[in-house]
Image (tube, helix red, strand yellow):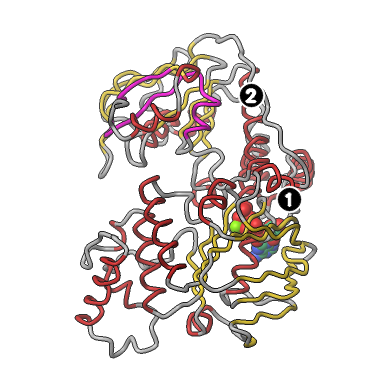
Amino acid sequence: MLELIDIHKHFGPVRANDGVTMRVEAGTIHGLLGENGAGKSTLMKVLAGFISADSGEILLGGEPLEVSNPKESVTAGIGLLHQDPLLCLPFSVLENFMLGRPESFVLDPDTARTELEDLAARFDFQFLADATARSLTVGERQQLEILRLLSLGVRVLILDEPTTAISATQRALLFATLRKLAEEGMTVIFVSHKLEEIDEICDTATVLRAGQVTGEVVLPVSSSELVSLMFGKAIIPEERTDVDLGEPVVDLRNITAIERLVRLQDVSLTARAGEVIGLAGLAGSGQQTMLKVCAGQRKPDAGTVVVHGEDVTRSSYNHHMGIGVHWLPADRLGEGLVEGLSVTEHFALAGDTPQGFVVDWAGAGEEAATKISHFSVKGTTESTPESLSGGNQQRLLLAMMPDHVELLLMEHPTRGLDIESAEWVWHQILERRNDGTAIVFSSADLDELLRYSDRILVFFAGRVLRELVAADADAEELGYLIGGKERE
Ligand SMILES: Nc1ncnc2c1ncn2[C@@H]1O[C@H](COP(=O)(O)OP(=O)(O)OP(=O)(O)O)[C@@H](O)[C@H]1O
Ligand SMILES: [Mg+2]
């Protein structure tokens, strides 16, 4: 059905795709697996007409496919679902559904509405045609985008890491939808670096490493085999060591902070030096607001924040940074890094050497080069963050962390990272703990919460439903609590 033959795509010295050949049959779900920076997104962007390959050939149903932009590719029957669906947020669901079709000038809204409702009913999607796209969750935006691509007649549906930001329920619905589509003869390409997902949903898979194919497999195969194809070696999880806890670093008392959709109410938390506290909960249950209050990014409506005995409830974010509070946001490109600025420029900005009006470019360049090699960032001092893969953006953020941090706050520290990068990131974080840094992090990954936390606070509807000692808890119990229920 679909053949990509000897695809090459280089970005300067980086061989993102270095002779990739992949074949996919109609009516199957094909996985594209590989570590961060392996070249998965690049290959899919070539296929969907977002970028053009330097060389290589694509055959669709035996015919050469010549596309130079996404619109031509959709017309040819290939649709790409981005990790963050590209919707027009102020528009309604129906208007978004109607976008991008050649006959959009004449398509009447009533016909479109019926088509949207029929399609939604077929897959059990529940959203209102007149709601604004902004009011949809990431999972619902994906569902809408899938329906839009289906109504445009695509026969090949590509999903690039579709499960990173959606709930377990939405994931189950997405998988059921993909199975149904494959049964109806659709070709589905599922991009991921999560082995369990590839195993659960795919019939066959191609594994990439450093721009080249390292394996083609028919599932199921053992995880250890996939891991060695992905990384060229086995990954052995690091054993966790305990550290003695010190004095309280941060003390939050009876915090209330009301935002539009989140009502954080009367939450208290104390973190001691060397302690790791995990915040669990569905998106929007209050964990993120709590972290922002800790970081000084948002002032609480009631309650107090004390860091090392100093009341910082009303202090600025800058003041928090000055006393050793460090924040690593989930939205790496939006909040953590600056698009368009090079790595060297990031170090010049983040540098704490006060030198008046003069920027020490040589110093920043040297520091950037040293940190790039120490943190194994795949990029150069001139790379901009948007040209780095997700895993490398996270490495860069960690590389920019000051030497001394009292309180480290992190949202989804390993979201989008492959196992090797995730292990590496936690190794860096836990080293900080040995120096007495207190760590508070949120995560949607139950195993991550259980493995790295000392204590876990489970948030539900803006309150802490339960506090657990991680060593005594299990994923099932945690799963129930996150949904607001005790284990049955
Ligand atoms: N526009 C670009 N300019 C320069 N380099 C790029 C660009 N896009 C991608 N790259 C580089 O190409 C390589 C492959 O990136 P790609 O995004 O395809 O990886 P990926 O397998 O999708 O990784 P991830 O799992 O982190 O999403 C990386 O080293 C990346 O830095
Ligand atoms: Mg990618």
Q: Taking the image as drawn, is residue 130 in sight?
A: yes
Which is nearer the eye, 476 or 463? Answer: 476
Which is nearer the eye, 480 or 322? Answer: 480
Q: Callout 1, which amino acid?
A: Leu
- Residue appearing at x 46%, y 33% in the figure: 442
x, y percentage for residue 352? 65, 34
Left or right of residue 442: residue 258: left
x, y percentage for residue 453? 51, 23
Q: Quadrant of ligand 1?
A: bottom right
Quadrant in which residue 326 is drawn: top right
Left or right of residue 61: residue 375: right
Q: Earlier in the sequence, mark 1 or mark 2?
A: 1
- Residue appearing at x 64%, y 61% in the figure: 40
Residue range (magenta) = 446-468
Which is nearer the eye, 183 or 73? Answer: 183
x, y percentage for residue 290? 37, 31
Q: CA distance from mark 1 to mark 2?
A: 32 Å
Quadrant in which residue 139 is drawn: bottom left
- Residue appearing at x 74%, y 46% in the figure: 228
Q: Residue 432, labelled with which disc?
A: 2
408 over 41 or under it: above or below:
above
Q: Quadrant of the N terminus?
A: bottom right
Q: Residue 229, labelled with which disc?
A: 1
